């Protein structure tokens, strides 16, 4: 117990990075599984159509639905990648000391991040 308490400042950040890596891996696996499932559904749909089990209209409607889901998944994946790669924007502004309503001077405000 004492050893754990002493190592917390050192191991805490490492544990946090490991947890984040696990979350990213889990998300990637989920997205891969979803893409794989959609590919399997599309293949099964094509086989059903080729075997004459479904009509052409039914095939086209279901194919369009699956393809739209695939596009949405790819777009979501691209958005996530863009958010991860996007550098943190910085906000910088300065405000000169102005008088407020009560006649007191407000302090200078500088925000750098």
Image: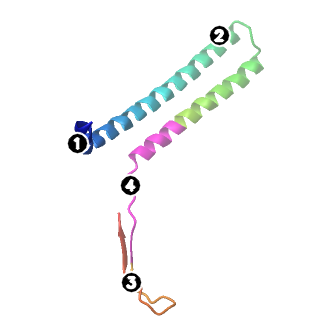
Disc number for residue 6: 1
Q: Are marks 2 and 4 in contact (CB under 8 Å)?
A: no
Q: Nearer the viewer, mark 3 or mark 4?
A: 3
N-terminal-most mark, 4 or 1: 1
Q: Quadrant of residue 43?
A: top right
Q: Nearer the viewer, residue 81 or 23?
A: 23
Q: Which residues are magenta?
A: 76-94
Residue sitting at x 34%, y 40%: 16
From mark 3 to mark 4, how far is it between C-alphas? 26 Å
Q: Are marks 2 and 3 in contact (CB under 8 Å)?
A: no
The residue that label 4 is drawn on is: 88
N-terminal-most mark, 3 or 1: 1
Q: Residue furthest top?
A: 51
N-terminal-most mark, 2 or 3: 2
Q: Residue furthest bottom?
A: 103
N-terminal-most mark, 2 or 1: 1
Q: Nearer the viewer, residue 54 or 96?
A: 96
Q: Nearer the viewer, mark 2 or mark 3?
A: 3
Q: Secondary structure at mark 4?
A: loop
Q: Nearer the viewer, mark 2 or mark 4?
A: 4
Q: Quadrant of residue 63?
A: top right
Q: Secondary structure at mark 3?
A: loop
Q: Is residue 71 left or right of residue 14?
A: right
The residue that label 2 is drawn on is: 47
The residue that label 3 is drawn on is: 96
Residue sitting at x 38%, y 38%: 20
Q: Nearer the viewer, residue 51 or 26?
A: 26
Task: Estimate the x, y position of residue 45 in percent, counting from the top left.
Answer: 66, 15
From mark 2 to mark 3, how far is it between C-alphas? 72 Å
Q: Residue furthest front?
A: 1
N-terminal-most mark, 2 or 4: 2
């Amino acid at each position: 117990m004492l050893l754990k308490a002493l190592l917390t400042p050192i191991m805490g950040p490492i544990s946090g990075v490991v947890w984040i890596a696990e979350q990213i891996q889990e998300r990637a696996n989920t997205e891969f599984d979803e893409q794989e499932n959609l590919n399997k559904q599309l293949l099964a749909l094509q086989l059903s159509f080729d075997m004459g089990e479904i009509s052409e209209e039914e095939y086209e409607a279901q194919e369009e639905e699956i393809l739209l889901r695939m596009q949405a998944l790819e777009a979501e994946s691209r958005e996530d990648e863009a958010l991860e790669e996007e550098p943190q924007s910085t906000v910088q502004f300065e405000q000169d000391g102005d008088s407020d309503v009560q006649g007191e001077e407000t302090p200078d405000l500088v925000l750098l991040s």
